[in-house]
């Protein structure tokens, strides 16, 4: 099988490429900036001709479409780019499949963020829960799902994954766990004591990225075309709970200070998903405990060189 991963050098994309190759899949990737090897192609997915050329060369059996504007927080600062670039990439991908008359199975990665400011009485969030979009990022993700519905009428076969918060080694700053583990590793190294934090009361459904990409692979093989699947643990934890686990793992003497720059203009109080559907259709369930994920992420940041 030949697979193409868009956004292959991103956080989840890099883990997905590794998982596919370990499974003896001939995996290729795209990245706007290029990759470390010849199988990751520097490709601007907003350039239709470039997308056609790549798909014509590879003729993939499966496409994992992860490339998109990545940050909910940054989408408030760049709302036009967040929406237009995300939709342009997917339209070009689908149009290229039609033009070349190829029919790969496509896994389109949406987001659990699109459930938004949901009433706590509706938790856990199932795929049928009404949406309440909290950010331009979420608007773009719903647009991706709508494109799946539209292009299905033209013969493009896609499955939609709605991952909730995924964490683990390799995630870059701008996300809660990455920010906390990076700071803790730096404080351990430099002897500092003050950890700067944003809102730690919000609760999120965290899943190890290595479990998440395993879900994507199972959805490509067993997911029903046109259907939406939550990818989540079914348990939500507050930022304070995550911090407590990390401080316990670190053992360093650290105190926290709230940093206004780390506060989001809109923050969902609780996101907890229902993974019943993906479990029933594919057999997937998370396997890596949160303690192991946090330990591995902290170890990743401890291994990084000090910033100059």
Image: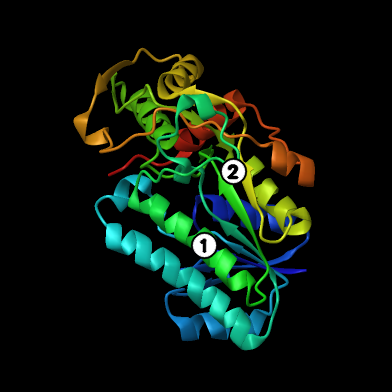
Q: Residue at x 50, y 44 (%)?
A: 170
Residue 146: assigned label: 1
Percent x, y of residue 218: 74, 51
Q: Is residue 88 above or below residue 188?
A: below
Q: How is the image coloured?
A: rainbow
Q: Quadrant of residue 6?
A: bottom right
Residue 119: assigned label: none
Do residues under tags 1 and 2 come within 8 Å of each other at their CB atoms? no
In this view, the residue in front, 12 or 87, is 87
Quadrant showing the N terminus = bottom right
In this view, the residue in front, 211 or 116, is 116
Q: Residue furthest left?
A: 260
For residue 174, side relative to residue 65 (left or right)? left
Q: Quadrant of residue 69?
A: bottom left
Quadrant showing the C terminus = top left
Percent x, y of residue 202: 39, 26
Q: Is residue 57 above or below residue 303?
A: below
Residue 128: assigned label: 2
Q: Residue at x 68, y 68 (%)?
A: 157
For residue 21, side relative to residue 292 (left or right)? right
Q: Quadrant of residue 53?
A: bottom right
Q: Is residue 29 above or below residue 272?
A: below
Say what secondary structure mark 1 lies in. helix
Dot 1 or dot 2: first in sequence order is 2
């Amino acid at each position: 099988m030949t697979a193409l991963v868009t956004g292959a050098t991103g956080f989840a994309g890099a883990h997905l490429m590794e998982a596919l190759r370990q499974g003896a899949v001939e995996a290729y990737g795209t990245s706007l900036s290029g990759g470390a090897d010849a199988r990751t192609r520097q490709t601007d997915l907003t350039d239709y001709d470039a997308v056609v050329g790549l798909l014509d060369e590879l003729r993939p059996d499966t496409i994992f479409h992860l490339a998109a504007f990545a940050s909910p927080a940054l989408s408030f600062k760049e709302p036009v780019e967040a929406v237009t670039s995300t939709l342009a990439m997917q339209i070009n991908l689908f149009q290229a499949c039609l033009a070349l008359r190829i029919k790969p199975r496509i896994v389109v990665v949406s987001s659990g963020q699109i459930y938004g400011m949901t009433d706590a009485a509706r938790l856990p969030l199932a795929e049928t829960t009404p949406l309440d979009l909290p950010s331009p990022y979420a608007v773009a993700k719903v647009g991706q799902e709508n494109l799946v519905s539209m292009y299905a009428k033209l013969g493009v076969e896609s499955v939609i994954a709605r991952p909730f918060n995924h964490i683990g080694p390799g995630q870059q700053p701008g996300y809660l766990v990455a920010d906390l583990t990076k700071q803790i590793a730096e404080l351990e190294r430099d002897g500092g004591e003050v950890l700067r934090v944003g809102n730690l009361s919000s609760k999120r459904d965290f899943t190890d990225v290595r479990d998440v990409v395993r879900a994507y692979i199972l959805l490509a093989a067993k997911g029903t075309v046109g259907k939406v699947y939550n990818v989540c643990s079914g348990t939500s934890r507050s930022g304070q709970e995550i911090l407590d686990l990390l401080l316990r793992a670190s053992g360093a003497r650290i105190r926290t200070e709230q940093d206004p720059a780390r506060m989001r203009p809109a923050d969902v109080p609780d996101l907890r998903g229902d993974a019943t559907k993906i479990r029933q259709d594919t057999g997937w369930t998370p396997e890596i405990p949160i303690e192991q994920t946090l330990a591995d992420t902290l170890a990743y940041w401890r291994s990084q060189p000090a910033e100059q």
